[in-house]
Image (spheres, rainbow, N blue to C red):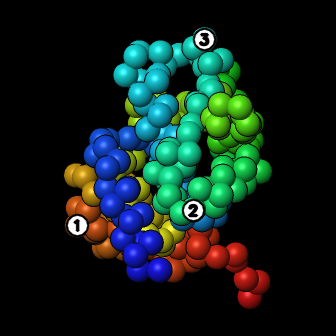
Amino acid sequence: MQAVMKQNTCKLSRVTHEQIRWSNAIVNSPVMYGLIERRTLYFITGEVKHKFTEKNLGVPDNWHDLYFHLTDKDLGLIGGDKNVPRTYEALSKLGEKFLPVSFRNSKGELIVGKVHWIDSFFYNTETGLYDVRVSPEIMPYLIDISKSFTTFDLGTAMLLRSKYTQKMYELCSQFCGDFRYTEKGEKESGVIYKKRVLPIGMEYFQADIQPRRDT
């Protein structure tokens, strides 16, 4: 087991250290993802960046070509060479999970709904390629985000070994800048937080880590 973990870490250490960006709607989502599922989301975000952001294709008219052709090497990069079937299963499950979103349309009306990360997932038995189609509805939360977003390092995120440290890293990245938490009524109560200090209740983590229990 230790040898396998060492091999997986070595493999993941070759992931590029580059900045990727998520809307805070994704970071703060209550949807629960496993370790490999979240690594897959990080990897996909990097691919979206390379294909659309760096080529200035970040407009809806270009989002029809959302297929990414992955290999066993790519799946091994995400979950480890010995866990390709596990990564395959994680990709399949991502298509079943909805991400809750809300936004205002051009008329100022509040729209609430749910979107997928992945619309479809195919395996070509002749070429050995995995064809993954990213949902166009998720794209506004990955590229051309001007406010309420979190930037973090892809290589660091991919190296994390548990879903708990993944979530903690995202939260730390979200509030690590020149940030001051403003609590409602803080002037009246006299409670003022220093910059980069954020009060978080345990229930905030439980929303992502485990199902809520009725009290």
Residue that numbered label 2 is attached to = 83
Which sits in the foreground, 121 or 136?
A: 121
Residue that numbered label 1 is attached to = 194
Name which of mark 3 and mark 1 comes first in the sequence. Answer: 3
**Camera-nearest label, 2 or 3:** 2
The three-letter code of the residue at mark 3 reads: Asp
Mark 2 surroundings: few (<14), some (14-19) or many (≥20) residues within 10 A: some
Mark 3 surroundings: few (<14), some (14-19) or many (≥20) residues within 10 A: few
> Could you give the CA–CA distance between mark 1 and mark 2, rounded to whole angstroms?
44 Å
Q: Secondary structure at mark 2?
A: helix
Residue 212 shows in the view? yes
199 shown above or below 87:
below
2 and 3 marks in contact (CB < 8 Å): no
**Residue displayed at 51% across by 68% down:** 163
Which sits in the foreground, 123 or 204?
A: 123
Mark 1 surroundings: few (<14), some (14-19) or many (≥20) residues within 10 A: few
Name which of mark 1 and mark 2 comes first in the sequence. Answer: 2
The three-letter code of the residue at mark 2 reads: Asn
**Camera-nearest label, 3 or 1:** 3
Residue 213 position in % (x across, y down): 73, 83
167 shown above or below 42:
below
Which sits in the foreground, 17 or 114?
A: 17
Q: Which label belongs to residue 61?
A: 3
213 shown above or below 178:
below
Q: Quadrant of residue 36?
A: bottom right
Q: Secondary structure at mark 3?
A: helix
**Residue displayed at 47% across by 65% down:** 167
Q: Quadrant of residue 121?
A: top right
The three-letter code of the residue at mark 1 reads: Lys
3 and 1 marks in contact (CB < 8 Å): no
Which sits in the foreground, 115 or 196?
A: 115
